Image (spheres, helix red, strand yellow):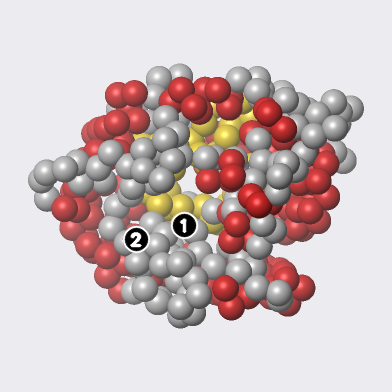
Amino acid sequence: MSAAGGTREPSSVPRPARICDAHHHLLDHWADYRVAELRADLATVPEVASTVHVECSSWYRETGPEPLRPVGETEWVVRNATGVAQAIVGRAELRLGAAVEEVLAAHLEAGAGRFRGIRQLANFDPSPELRRFEPDPGPGLLRDSRFREGFRVLGKLGLSFDTWLYFPQLPDLAALARAFPDTAIVLDHLGGPICVGPYQGRRPEVMARWRELLREVAACPNVALKLGGIGSPMLGHDWQRLPRKPGAEAIADTFGDAIRFCIDLFGPERCLFESNFPVDRVSFDYAALWEAFARMVRGASDAERAALFHDTAARVYRLG
């Protein structure tokens, strides 16, 4: 029985007592996913007690200095998202160097106690077959001296750093983590084991290399890993083309081994489950995803389950 339509698949799998959805977006451009749409999804998974909004280039200020315009997104979330998005991860250009402190201070003021850090995308590949995101980070962002000057300010202010990249870039993230061991880093979406563009048709090779490179990142104790992003078409499963969305069992069968590998590598205390909605909504429903996560870790202890679904995210994003 599938979970199409937002229903939950009947299951005897142990459910977590509480869930923190450690990564979702509220946005108004390629999809209209605002508070009402998020609440509708949350209603299908009553265990969700808190959520983390992660920047998505929405509701920027339309006037004023360019570096400060992303603060508008934090302002919008605080003004409109009550009872959800208890933590906010905003956007700031760390290549501003030390001058980024003004932007971070503005986020902190606008965040009304909910602003926790920033995300800056690092995903780059020289292949023209892969989409370039805006703003384009270009090659070597995490090694850039100006970026690292700005990164140092994050640590000074006690803020965290989220990023998404492609698996060949994992050594750059490990080097950054070693250079700033006291700054909390959160690696999004399993560390980017993409299987499209130049990596299409090479899944066994990609996954073997991803596992190898992820070990280097896991050796850095200041890095936590988000378990999710598995509905993205960039992972090459083309679920978005199916006439019927896959249910929890199919999702768990497809990604269970990879996610259990990550948990064994980082430990439950450094792993956070995430929905990545509405991006992953193209592939499956919200309830099916969380049921799939529960199936993937059915052998976990109560303490491990609590960490994976709630406690690690609450600690990383200081939710109390």
Residue 59, placed above or below residue 235:
above
Residue 134 badge:
2
Residue at the spot 54% in from the left edge and 53% down from the top edge? 188
How packed mark 2 is, by other alpha carbons closer than 10 Å (few <14, some 14-19, many 20 or more), is few
63 with respect to 39 (left or right): left
Q: What residue type is labelled 2?
A: Glu
Q: Which of 144 and 242 is in front in this view?
A: 242
143 with respect to 12 (left or right): left
Residue 81, placed above or below residue 147:
above
Residue 1 badge:
none
Answer yes or no: is residue 101 visible: yes
Answer yes or no: is residue 302 visible: no
Residue 243, placed above or below residue 266:
above
Instruction: Please tell me in which quadrant of the rendered image residue 133 appears.
Output: bottom left
Residue at the spot 59% in from the left edge and 78% down from the top edge? 198
Instruction: Please tell me in which quadrant of the rendered image residue 113 appears.
Output: top left
Residue at the spot 66% in from the left edge and 62% down from the top edge? 236
Residue that badge 1 annotates: 163
Residue 300 screen position, x and y as percent:
83, 40
Residue 313 screen position, x and y as percent:
57, 38
Q: Residue furthest left?
A: 64
- Label 2, secondary structure: give it: loop
Q: Which amino acid does label 1 sit on?
A: Thr
